[in-house]
Amino acid sequence: MINLTNSAVNALKSAISASAQPTSGLRIMVEAGGCDGFKYKMGLADEAKSDDTVIERDGIKVFVDNKSHEHLAGTTIDFVVALEGSGFTFDNPNVSSSCSCGKSFGR
């Protein structure tokens, strides 16, 4: 299961309402790349694909393809506002190492 904090839910609701495209949720994927082997990729999406797991929280749908789901099980996604900038963070229990930017990880 993937968890969203209240801050992440609120940020996503704002992004969805401001989107010019029809949007019903967030697509999250894990791809090969980045400094440590894997990287997170995310963006707004309108609907699930045939191989997606769909998670819903407070009216927000999260679409995760089955390949990425194994890398993200148990992950908590937060939206953080800080002096260095604002953005989504991933607290992923499956990670064995990560780079300093927090955008890529190793398993």
Image (spheres, rainbow, N blue to C red):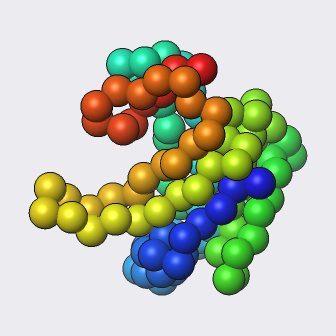
Picture coordinates of residue 11, whole percent (x, y): 43, 75
Picture coordinates of residue 80, whole percent (x, y): 34, 65
On screen, 68 above or below 18?
A: above
Corner quadrant of residue 1: bottom right
Q: Residue furthest left?
A: 83
* Residue 5 falls left or right of residue 60: left
Picture coordinates of residue 12, whole percent (x, y): 49, 72
Work out which quarter of the rendered image holds the C terminus and state it. Answer: top right
On screen, 98 above or below 53?
A: above
Picture coordinates of residue 4, whole percent (x, y): 59, 66
Image mark count: 0
Residue at 41% x, 57% y: name it. 88
- Would you say residue 49 is visible in this rendering? no
* Residue 29 falls left or right of residue 13: right
Residue at 68% x, 83% y: name it. 58
Which residue is at the front of the view, 105 or 17?
105
- Would you say residue 9 is visible in this rendering? yes
* Residue 64 falls left or right of residue 84: right
